[in-house]
Image (cartoon, rainbow, N blue to C red):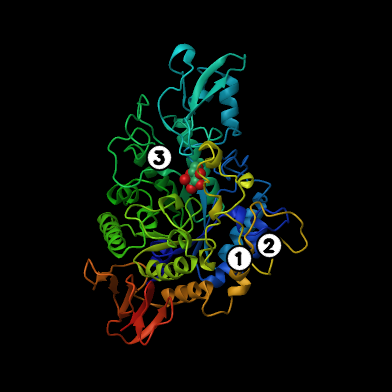
Amino acid sequence: MDSARTRTSWWRDAVIYQVYLRSFADGNGDGTGDIAGLRRRLPHLAGLGVDALWITPWYPSPMADGGYDVADYRDIDPLFGTLDDAQALLDEVHGHGMRLIIDIVPNHTSTAHAWFRRALAEGPGSAARERYIFRPGRGPRGAEPPNDWRSVFGGSAWTRITEPDGSPGPWYLHLFAPEQPDLNWDDPQVRAEFESVLRFWFDRGVDGVRIDVAHGLVKAPGLPDLGSLDGKLLEGAHREDHPHWDREEVHEIFQGWRAVADTYDEPRVFVAEAWTGAPERLARYVRPDELHTAFNFDYLMTPWRPDRLRRVIDSSLSALGQVAAPATWVLSNHDVARHVSRYARPQPEGPLRSLSDLKGPADLDLGTRRARAAALLTLALPGSAYLYQGEELGLWEVEDLPEDLLQDPTWLRSGRTDRGRDGCRVPLPWQGDTPPFGFSPEGSRARTWLPQPEAWKSLTVAAEEGDPSSMLELYREALRVRRAEPALGDGTLAWESDPDSTLLVFRRAPGFRCVVNFSEEPAALPEHGTVLLASGPLHEGRLPSDTAVWLKD
Ligand code: GLC
C-alpha cells in the first residue's frame, strides 16, 4: 500500500475501539470515567493494537441520557475534564499512532442547551422556537399530543410546555427522552450550526465523527401519524416512507458534511449510526459523495447461527460493494447487551440485541467460547471493525444491577419493565482483587457510578495480561496477525463451505482461510500450511465446537 493511500483511506480497514468515557477509567477519583483516566490508560489501547478510538459524547450535559443530551457542542463537561484535556488527549492519541473519532449528536440537543432555553423564553412565533419541533396539541384545549409518535425509550414522543406567562403551551417532539428535544433540520440555522461544530473539532485535529441517530434528522412534512408503523429503531425489513426514520432528505445533509470533511488536508471521516432495516438502505448513507462508513447493526443482531451469519455477511458486502464502501463489523456497543451474554443462551431465529430476545439461564462459558470464535470471524472479514471496551476482556452483561441504581432512562420510561442498557456500561476492571479494580486511582473513596461484579476479578487487564488463554491475549494476537497478514483488512472473500454447512470456511487472498465450527462435533480442517491463530485448543488437529481458526496456505 503506498503512503498516499494509507493516508487517505485508513478507515477502510481500521480496527476502532469504542471508549464509553464514563466507564473506561477514572482519573480524578469521583467514580466516573474521564479524559485524565483515558490518557493514563492509552498504553493499554496502543498495546492492544487498535488503529483508532471512538469516544462517546464528552460535552457539557445534564446526563439525562449518558451525555447524548448535549448542552454545548463546543466544550467538555467538567465531569470529564476541560478543552485543554481534550487537546492533550488528542495529541497523545496521535503520538501513539492512533486516530480519534468523536461523537456528534445532531438529532436533538439537551433541554439545557442555550437554544432550547431561548425557545422556551422567546415564545410562540420566535425564530428560536423554529429550531425545534413545537406543535399545538390535539383534542379539547390541546391536551393530547400532536400525533402518535413514540419515544424510543418508551411513552409518547411529545411533552407539553408551559409558556412564560404560565399558560399551557404547545408540545415539543423528542424521539428519545423528554430532556432531548428534536431539532428542526428544515431550519437553515440548524444546518449551519452543525457544519460549524464539525469545523470546530476538525480544526483541533479530530480525525472523524460518529453521527448519532443519523437516520432520524428529517421528519415527514406535516408529521403524519405512525398508524400501524413501529416507532422503534428499524430492525428487519425497511418500511417505505416512515415518517421519522431513514427519510430520503437526510442524505443532502450528509453530502454537505462530506464537503466540509473534504476541505481538510487529511480528509476527516464519518461513521453513521443508522438503523435502516436493510443493507441497501444503509448503503445509501455511504455513497461516494456522502459518509465514509456506517455501523453494521444487522451483523451485530445476528444470532450465533452459521446460515444467518453467512447471509448477513454476503448481503452487507454486496450492498456496500455497489457503492464501493467498505463494510464495518461490530459485535457490541453501549446500547446492546454484551455479546458474551447474548451468545450464552439458546439462539433465536430472529434478531438478537437485547437479552429479552432470549430465554433460559446464561451459560457464560459457552458465551465466552463463542465470543472468542466471533472475534476471529469478525476480524477476518473484509473491511473495518469496531470493538466495544471490555470485549477484549471477555466482560459479560451485568444482569443483576440493583434496580435503585439503574440510570438508563429506559428503565423509568418503560414503567420499570425494561432494565435498559446499564448492564453493558459497568466500569472496566483494570487490576486487583476487589472493586473498583483500579478503575479509580488508588486511595479514592468514591464508588463507581455503577457497581462492578466481584467475579470480574479474573477478568481484569492485569489478570489476563500474559495469560495465553485469556481473551485479552487472543485480541492482541489477532490484531497483530491482522496487521501482518496482507490478506486481512480491506478486500473480498470467497466461501469454500456449502451455504447450509455448520462449518463456515472462507478464503482471502493471498493464502488465508478462516474456519468456524458451529456444529456440536469437532470438524476436520481443510488442508493448510500453518495455524496462525485459534480461538481455542484444537483436538488432535480437529476444530472443536464453537471454535474458529485462521490458517495460512
Ligand atoms: C444513539 C446512542 C444512544 C442514545 C441515543 C439518543 O442511539 O447510541 O446511546 O441513547 O442515540 O441520543
> Of residues 256 and 304, which is closer to you in this image?
304
Q: Quadrant of residue 518?
A: bottom left
SS label for mark 2: loop
Mark 2–mark 1 CB contact (< 8 Å): yes
> Of residues 323 and 299, which is closer to you in this image?
299
Q: Quadrant of residue 60?
A: top right
Q: Is residue 280 left or right of residue 83?
A: left
User: Counting other residues with Cα less than 10 Å from the Cα at mark 2, is it few (<14), some (14-19), or many (20 or more)?
Assistant: many
Residue at 46%, 31% in the rendered image: 157
x then y, percent, for residue 455: 61, 65
Q: Which residue is mark 1?
A: 456
Q: Is residue 180 left or right of residue 324?
A: right
Q: Which residue is mark 3?
A: 232
Visible residue check, residue 341: yes
Q: Which residue is mark 2?
A: 435
User: Counting other residues with Cα less than 10 Å from the Cα at mark 1, is it few (<14), some (14-19), or many (20 or more)?
Assistant: many
Residue at 35%, 41% in the rendered image: 251
Mark 3–mark 2 CB contact (< 8 Å): no
Q: What's the amino acid at mark 3?
A: Lys
Of pointers 2 and 1, the one earlier in the residue sequence: 2
* Measured Cα–Cα span from mark 3 to mark 2: 36 Å
Residue at 59%, 43% in the rendered image: 74
Of pointers 1 and 3, the one earlier in the residue sequence: 3
Q: Quadrant of the C terminus?
A: bottom left
SS label for mark 1: helix
